[in-house]
Image: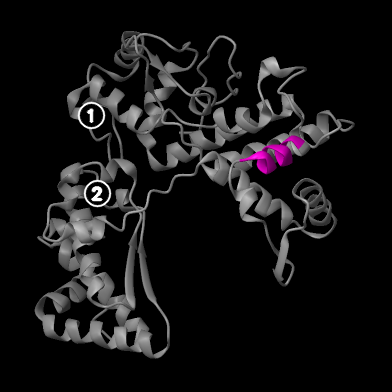
Amino acid sequence: MFGDLLSKGGDAYQVWRAIVARWLAAVVSDSVPCHSWEATVDWVKGQPETFGRLLERAAAHCVAKARIGLIVFDALDRSSMNWQTMDSIVRDLLRVVLSLKSFPALHGKVFLREDQFIDLQIADFPDASKLLSTRVELTWAPHDLHGLLWHGLCNGPDRSGRLLRGIYQGVVGSAPTCVADEAWVIADTVKREGRFQRTLFEALAGKWMGRDRRRGIPYSWTVGHLADGRGRASPRSFLAAIRAAAEDTQERYPDHSVALHYESIKRGVQKASDIRVWELAEDYPWVNTLMSPLRGLTVPCAFEAIADRWVENLGEHPADMSSARLPPEHYEQGWTGIRADLETLGIFESMKDGRVNMPDLHRVGFGLGRRGGVKPVTKVARE
């Protein structure tokens, strides 16, 4: 939609206002021209006073109903294949969301990828700081992940839920709180890093990642091997690894003393890595194109070894790559620009000696090796 409207001389700011107008009209059961987006855009552009009254009526309606009106914007990377156009689209959206702040009952929430937010050009408009001050980074600390895990386990169904709440009570000293309809809330102390979290995970996975302490502690090993190059692990990867480890333990080690065998945890990391590769391929299709030629390479390694493979398989310059989606932000700077983009995503990490390393989360899924590391999976994500 955006591409067509902008190619016809449309204004991204007015397009976003048109989207908001359709939402507000639905809130108050009003009507605006909807037979085409061009018609809605022309309406908000030509009827600013009427659009303003629509905002006021929708805000008053929400106040009268004691409700909050919320409109959510996501997947903005799909609206353009050009970074300059993308910056303009995002900047104008933020301007529209800022305008909603005049109405306490109306809110806009915008999800942006990190590479979309790094360029401060998107905040180049008056009073942008009022909006940016409400920014929230969707990052999860290790203790957040373990808290989420036990929240889910304690709310498990039937016998499994009762069993896990029993384990929880045995460690914490009291059962989770039942609030309503068999919904259980864990204690705040279990949501924070400390002896309860560590002891609870030990009840699931044992003390060591092998026969003794030299192999590491499952509590920290699991999250550590699921972190990207910037030390961040996602809930989806963590929970996928735990689920895969539990299933593998049940299949391979049915008589094991705890639910998660340490070898199964390693296989769970492999599974989570494969899932993460699929996620990256969905959000950044060019990542798979760049990583496929590196399969079989051992890291850490000199960047020249990586660049040589790219040149051999993809051409002398990143511009030679074809993509139907938004390209890497710094592809015009050559392969060093690509390296910077991959570091921003946490796929690459630079070592002090200049070599390139990769966290297990990505290295395993993309099929690269490291001496003594978790083995790569057998396949990379599909094209």
Residue annotated with mark 2: 80
Q: Which mark is residue 331?
A: 1
Residue lying at 73% horizontally and 41% vertically, measured from the top left: 200
Whether residue 200 is visible here, answered yes or no, is: yes
The x, y position of residue 13, in whole percent, is 16, 64
Is residue 290 positioned above or below 46 on the image?
Answer: above
Q: Tell me the number on the disc at residue 287.
A: none
Give the quadrant of the N terminus. Answer: bottom left
Secondary structure under the numbered disc 2 in the rendered image: loop
Q: Quadrant of residue 338?
A: top left
Q: Position of residue 192 (x, y in %)?
A: 58, 46
Q: Which residues are magenta?
A: 194-202
Is 99 on the left or on the right of 186, as rendered? left
Please tell me which residue is depicted at 30% across the width and 77% down the height of the picture: 104
Q: Quadrant of residue 159?
A: bottom right
Lower sequence index among marks 1 and 2? 2
> Which three-letter amino acid code belongs to the residue tagged 1?
Tyr
Q: Verify whether residue 198 appears in magenta.
A: yes
Rendered-image quadrant of the C terminus: top left
> 10 Å neighbourhood of mark 1: few (<14), some, or many (≥20)?
some
